[in-house]
Amino acid sequence: MSRESRVFGLHAVTAALRNDPENVTRLLVDRGRHDRRLKEVLELAREHGVRVEQVDARQLEREAGSDRHQGVVARYQAPEALGEEALDDILATHPQPLLLVLDSVTDPHNLGACLRTADAAGVAAVIVPRDKAVGLTPTVRKVACGAAESVPFIQVTNLARTLDSLKQQGLWVIGAAGEGAAELYDVDFTGGCVLVMGAEGSGMRRLTREHCDHLVRIPMRGQVESLNVSVATGICLYEALRQRGVASSRSQAAGQP
């Protein structure tokens, strides 16, 4: 299923036109803008037969719900978020997956940034609770720069139950928390694992924390006590990516498949 949404900003619209042009129903562009970057977007639209409409900046603001549209808004038949049942297919095609859970992240800029990093780090899916958390809003899609379309995004009704199910299927659940007993760099991310990040300010909920196999902390050597969730997610995912790359290289050197 899909619903009509809005994608705005040069990067996000370009990604939609390149990766999912059949679901872009119309392109609205600022009639007063004629620069090279916008011309590239218009050329993509022409290649894929997307209807283009020249409008004024005020209409673009109304369409985007923001003045940060960069002169372009796409009307987009956005795929709905996936349900928990999609995890079965993901686990079947990723025998040693790296999954990212975001517990109650409500800021769309943080979610968009986390999706973008998840795509870069090869995350198999991003999982969020259905309630009290932001979904795939136009702002999220803009900040994600195409990652909202490339990374499976799964909303679940009961996050604790989902974590239990993943553990039963052999995945380790590793939560990031300031009170973690081990530092991030001391925990093994090389097998199938789930990285759990908490919400802005409050961190993971109690039940989520209790369902983690390990709690790890990012070492902090300065005066600040915590990091923005999207920054912390990037640090943790790239440590996992580093470890998994090293493990893969060692396996290949040893002649293992």
Image (tube, helix red, strand yellow):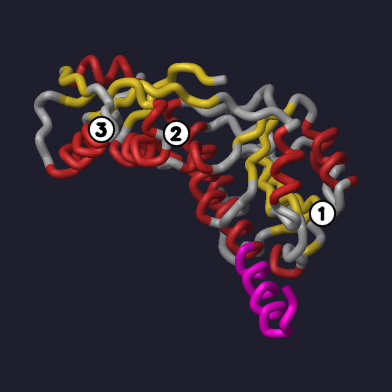
Residue at the spot of label 2: 141
User: Of discs 3 and 2, which sits in the foreground?
Assistant: 3
**Residue found at x 70% / y 44%:** 90
Say which quarter of the image contains residue 206: top right
Q: What's the magenta region? A: 241-257
Residues at circles 3 and 1 in contact by the CB criterion of under 8 Å: no
Residue at the spot of label 3: 45
Disc 3 marks a residue whose amino acid type is: Ala
Disc 2 marks a residue whose amino acid type is: Arg
Which tag, 3 or 2, sits closer to the chain's start?
3
Disc 1 marks a residue whose amino acid type is: Trp
Residue at the spot of label 1: 172
Say which quarter of the image contains residue 181: bottom right
Q: Locate residue 177, reporting x and y percent.
A: 73, 50
Q: Is residue 62 visible?
A: yes
- Report the residue that reaches farthest toward the right: 168
